[in-house]
Amino acid sequence: MIQLRHATDAHDAGVRQRATDLRRDRRITTSARLRAHTSAHIDDQRRDVDLVVISDVHLGSRACRAEALLEYLRSIRPRQLVLNGDIVDGWVFRRGYWPASHHAVLAALCDFLRDGTDVTYVTGNHDDVLRRYSLLQLAGLKLVDDLELDLAGRRTWILHGDRFDDRCTTPRWLAAVGSVAYDATVLLDNVANPVRRRLGMRAQASAAYFKRALPSVIAHIRAYEDTCAAAAAERGFDAVITGHIHQPNVRSIAGVSYLNCGDWVENCSALEFHDERWRVVGAELAEAPTPVLACEPEMQIA
């Protein structure tokens, strides 16, 4: 009798396990079909772009606008992609903040590698730990501190831009105060914007507003841009592309084209080079985009 009961229990357990396995297989199959359908739908809508440059994503920080970046990445099919520093925020990484949207951004970047996109990661100051591994190549990903490209016959220098901080004329104490104020402003926006959305109000990027309104900040940004262009001219470059200051812009400075791809904290912007023309794109994804200033005749703003 005891043996019969054991046999019955074992049979019931086997039936339950098979039912569980069947439900799991159905979920996996359904999920795979959904991903395939979604991927095919996205691919049909993607734009071909020769080169895309993005920076200052700050994955791992609460300031990162990962959802907006994911929307942008799903809209493009780049031949070459340059990740121009501060993609992962190593300064706050140990705090353990890593939502699903941040993982989805990394997955989208890996998809580009899988699809044959030439991807280069240029190190920044928030991911400077990677600089000890510069010149590493792994699974199609190149890790460098700066990059030189020939684009439409113009020597173009791409780097994050933090190396120019010491050359700017802004006093260190003022830069330090500005950095603290910036972080505090972004933190307040992260708290206030969800409330604004629930009330049906437009979210705001207060840091972008202060950059346009405060003369000291405007002067610091202009000094940084001039310094980048002067350093590029010293090295014989025709153009320089940076990130770092979270301020998308295109300027001609003493014969050197200065371009900044912006960020994915305030402006949600990127640089695209296609058909031998540069343009700043992605600002339409931001809820309070910073206007991009003057551009050269061969460039344009989307």
Image (tube, rainbow, N blue to C red):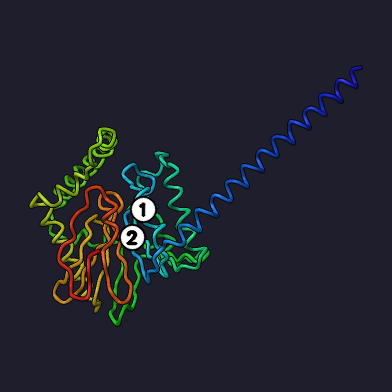
Q: Which quarter of the rendered picture does the N terminus lie within?
A: top right
Tally of numbered tags? 2
Secondary structure of the residue carrying tag 2 is: strand
Q: Hey, which quadrant is residue 118 in on the image?
A: bottom left
Taking depth in this image into account, of 101 and 240 the one nearest to the observer is 101
Residue 163: x %, y % from top left: 26, 61
Q: Relative to the observer, which residue lies in front, 276 or 87?
A: 276
Task: Tell me what residue is drawn at x 26 percent, y 58 percent.
Answer: 262
Above or below — where is 8 with respect to 288? above
Q: Earlier in the sequence, mark 2 or mark 1?
A: 2
Counting from the top left corner in percent of width and height, residue 284 is at: 27, 55
Report the residue marked by disc 1. Answer: 69
Q: What is the three-letter code of the residue carrying label 1?
A: Leu
Contact check, label 2 and label 1, Cβ < 8 Å: yes
How crowded is the residue under tag 1: few (<14 C-alpha within 10 Å), some, or many (20+)?
many
Please give the name of the residue rendered at 53% of the width and 64% of the height, measured from the top-left corner: 139
Residue 105 pos. (x, y %): 43, 52
Q: Is residue 64 left or right of residue 79?
A: left
Residue 187 lies, with reference to residue 85, above or below; the image says above
- Which residue lies under the disc numbered 2? 54
Which of the 4 image quadrants contains residue 74? bottom left
Residue type of the residue flagged with mark 2 = Ile
